[in-house]
Amino acid sequence: MTERTNPRPVEPSDLKRRIGRTGVWLSSLSQEPAARVRGAAAEIERMGYATLWIGETPSSREAFTHAALLLSATDSMHIATGIANVWARDAVAAANAAKTLAEGWDHRFVLGLGVSHAPLVRSRGHDYSSPLEFMKDYLDAMDQAAFDAPLTETPPRLLAALRPKMLELAAERTQGAHPYFIPVEHTARARAIMGSEAVLAPEVAVVVETDPGRARAAARRYAEVYLGLPNYVNNLRHLGFSDADFENGGSDALIDAVVPWGDPDTIAERVRAHHMAGADHVCVQPIADDVETQLDHLRRLAPAING
């Protein structure tokens, strides 16, 4: 029988080094055939991005098996869930799935967890009345989960966090936070709330297009679903946007703040702005009509944001 050791937690400083300064966030991979997913992941790794983030929705690939598909197609790139939905499986299943992936692929897996959104959660038959308390209980149960296979370290966890209380929980109970659909101002506030040690890894959607009309039209198509979800709208209100900013697909000021657009150098400046505001890692999500175009945009962005 293999001798068991007590797995050690990953220090936030070590996780910052592992995931690198920039990564890629691609929900579109969940809609592609498995062979195409493997090829895209391998190509993103060759471009020099240190981490690839994937999402989870009620109609997408299941987060942990999707991560296994990506881990099997790459050699050194980290794979992170942005996020695995806590309502999709109980805490013990999530804890042990994460440990299985970490042990099986040289600790290249990062578990991003989130409470999702009221409409999506209620559609699954769950009660969304106390998401913060649910997350606290979920983390408690994860910490208590037994795991028989050998493990040298526990897989790192990040929380999808927007508002102060969830950001505080992320800093206290996990390695850090993974905010989504946010402007630079949120990154600065999140850093102030979480302190200097915790990992801060925001997602930033980008449009590689220099024409303002075409760029904002693409950004509005992307933003439409998020501007219909209270968590995101309330967070943006907290940052100073008004009701008028949410009308007609979003004001130019709101769209430009949340979805940078322009040539690769312009977008790289916005990525650096998040770093200067306190982000340790920025995962860019290229907005385009298909995966091939997204990959092309990532190739064009790589020298500017990975240099």
Image: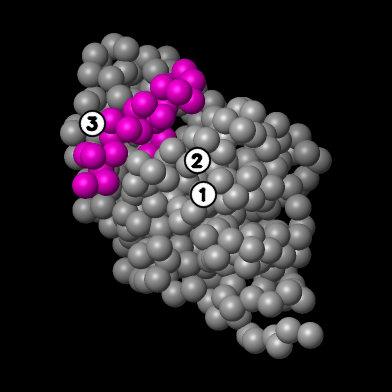
The location of residue 136, given as percent across then percent down, is: 63, 65
Label 3 packing within 10 angstroms: few (<14), some (14-19), many (20+): many
Q: Which residues are magenta?
A: 282-307
| Mark closer to the chain start, 2 or 3 | 2
Q: CA distance from mark 1 to mark 3?
A: 25 Å
Q: What mark, if any, has residue 117 been given in the picture?
A: none
| Mark closer to the chain start, 1 or 3 | 1
Which residue appears at 28% of the width and 34% of the height? 301
**Can residue 105 be spotted in the picture?**
yes
The total number of labels drawn is: 3
Which residue bears the numbered disc 3?
Answer: 264
Which residue appears at 22% of the width and 39% of the height? 304
Mark 3 is on which residue type? Answer: Pro
The N terminus lies in which quarter of the figure? bottom right
The location of residue 190, given as percent across then percent down, is: 37, 56
Residue nearest the viewer, comparing 300 with 257: 300
Which residue bears the numbered disc 1?
Answer: 74
Please give left or right for residue 230 compared with residue 238 in the image.
right
Mark 1 is on which residue type? Answer: Thr
Helix, strand or loop at disc 2?
A: helix
Which residue bears the numbered disc 2?
Answer: 41
Asked whether the residues under the numbered discs 1 and 2 touch, taking CB atoms below 8 Å apart as contact, a structural biologist would say yes
Label 2 packing within 10 angstroms: few (<14), some (14-19), many (20+): many
Which residue appears at 35% of the width and 57% of the height? 20
Mark 2 is on which residue type? Answer: Ala
The location of residue 103, given as percent across then percent down, is: 63, 67
Above/below status of 297 relative to 72 = above
In the rendered image, residue 288 lying in the magenta stretch gets the answer yes
